[in-house]
């Protein structure tokens, strides 16, 4: 793969041929040259998360400075995520020009060989780790403000939202599950919990999709603490109120409690986010009340975690040759699936 990334860099430097494919896009040649300087080295990064769909190349110049990021699908069948991220970033730059420098910018998106690749500008900074989230109040506040400041992009009916973003995935998961599996109950409870959204009108917001470690960076430079977000492959221009905040609040709660692992995180999640009197849940409710009708907050909370848990389906579909047993084992150990189960569980 590292040799392939070198081929990708050479091809992009040489200039993209004109095509009729609207998915092919490139910045002016000077921007490409700046992103891929002669003599650059490409550091291969292979994320270990089960949902990760890309191999990443960090482009370093001769002085070791990060100049750009190359993203390549792990599978030749999975160009969709690369194209989607490129589209989202370009639209975000139009909708929120004030975020320039706090999100990557698209330099090029093109087919090279059998895969479509994405070249982005980098964000230079340090990951917002659990330890830093515990100790750096400025970084925490900046991350929360970042999510709160993502632009409203219009309105959408709750029925359309559920039938587009949720129901097809619930049906797909139900078809994969063996009879009697506990997630059948979670699916039924989810449908019941989100039903108040049907027939209502909701504002739509720009959505990142996974605002947690390692996607949040504390940016270098400046007199105040600033953060930026990378990895927009799950982003949506017409996303759901509260989706990003729910995941960020969970990350901060786990950081504060210094816990790792599904079992320990599950306990903290119930205490701080599932219980209506939990501190993080109150923050979530206040956010929803500023953007939508306050009575929809419980439904939006369950929807956020159902969508997070259902992300496992992307990996399952791409890895079907691994066998059903292996795939179901991944579902069983997924943190997001466990948190979804707790969020949807009926409580007295």
Image (cartoon, grey):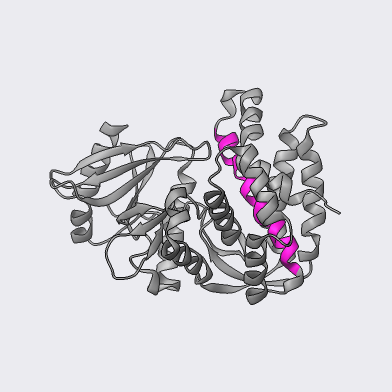
Is 163 on the left or on the right of 68, as rendered? right
The residue positioned 70% from the left and 50% from the top of the image is 270
The answer, for residue 16, to whether it is visible in the render is: no
- Can you give x and y, in whole percent of width and height, for residue 110 in the image? 34, 49
The rendered magenta stretch, by its main secondary structure, is classed as: helix
The residue positioned 55% from the left and 34% from the top of the image is 318
Residue 183 image-quadrant placement:
top right
- Can you give x and y, in whole percent of width and height, for residue 338 in the image? 67, 41
Is 121 on the left or on the right of 241, as rendered? left
- Can you give x and y, in whole percent of width and height, for residue 187 in the image? 77, 45
Q: Is residue 333 above or below residue 326?
A: below
Asked if residue 312 lies in the magenta stretch, the reply is yes
The answer, for residue 54, to whether it is visible in the render is: yes
Q: Is residue 276 above or below residue 179?
A: below
Q: Quadrant of the N terminus?
A: top left
Q: Is residue 178 above or below residue 64?
A: above
The foreground one among 248 and 140 is 140
Q: Which residues are magenta?
A: 296-318
The residue positioned 65% from the left and 37% from the top of the image is 263
The residue positioned 27% from the left and 39% from the top of the image is 43
Q: Is residue 27 above or below residue 99?
A: above
Asked if residue 153 lies in the magenta stretch, the reply is no
Residue 41 image-quadrant placement:
top left
């Amino acid at each position: 793969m590292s040799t392939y990334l070198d081929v990708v860099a050479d091809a992009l430097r040489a200039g993209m041929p004109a095509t009729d494919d609207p998915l092919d896009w490139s910045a002016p040649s000077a921007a490409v040259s700046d992103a891929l300087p002669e003599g650059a080295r490409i550091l291969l990064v292979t994320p270990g998360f089960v949902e990760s769909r890309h191999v990443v190349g960090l482009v370093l110049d001769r002085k070791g400075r990060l100049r750009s990021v190359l993203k390549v699908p792990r599978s030749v069948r999975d160009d969709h995520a690369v194209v989607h991220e490129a589209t989202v970033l370009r639209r975000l730059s139009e909708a929120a020009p004030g975020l320039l420098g706090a999100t990557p910018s698209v330099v090029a998106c093109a087919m090279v060989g059998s895969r479509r690749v994405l070249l982005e500008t980098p964000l230079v900074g340090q990951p917002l780790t659990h330890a830093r989230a515990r100790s750096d109040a400025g970084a925490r506040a900046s991350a929360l403000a970042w999510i709160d400041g993502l632009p409203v992009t219009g309105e959408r009916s709750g029925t359309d939202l559920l039938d587009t973003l949720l129901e097809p995935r619930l049906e797909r998961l139900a078809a994969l599950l063996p009879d009697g599996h506990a997630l059948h109950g979670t699916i039924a409870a989810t449908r019941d919990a989100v039903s108040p959204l049907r027939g209502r009108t909701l504002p739509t917001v720009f959505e990142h999709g996974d605002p947690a470690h390692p996607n949040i960076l504390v940016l270098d430079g400046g007199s105040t603490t600033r953060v930026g977000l990378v990895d927009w492959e799950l982003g949506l221009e017409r996303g759901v109120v509260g989706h990003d905040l729910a995941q960020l609040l969970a990350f901060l709660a786990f950081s504060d409690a210094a816990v790792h692992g599904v079992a320990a995180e599950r306990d903290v999640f119930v205490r701080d986010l599932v219980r209506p009197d939990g501190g993080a849940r109150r923050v979530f409710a206040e956010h929803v009340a500023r953007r939508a009708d306050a009575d929809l907050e419980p439904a939006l909370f369950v929807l956020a975690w159902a969508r997070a848990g259902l992300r496992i389906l992307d990996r399952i579909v791409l890895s079907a040759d691994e066998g059903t047993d292996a795939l179901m084992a991944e579902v069983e150990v997924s943190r997001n699936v466990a948190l979804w189960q707790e969020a949807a569980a009926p409580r007295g």
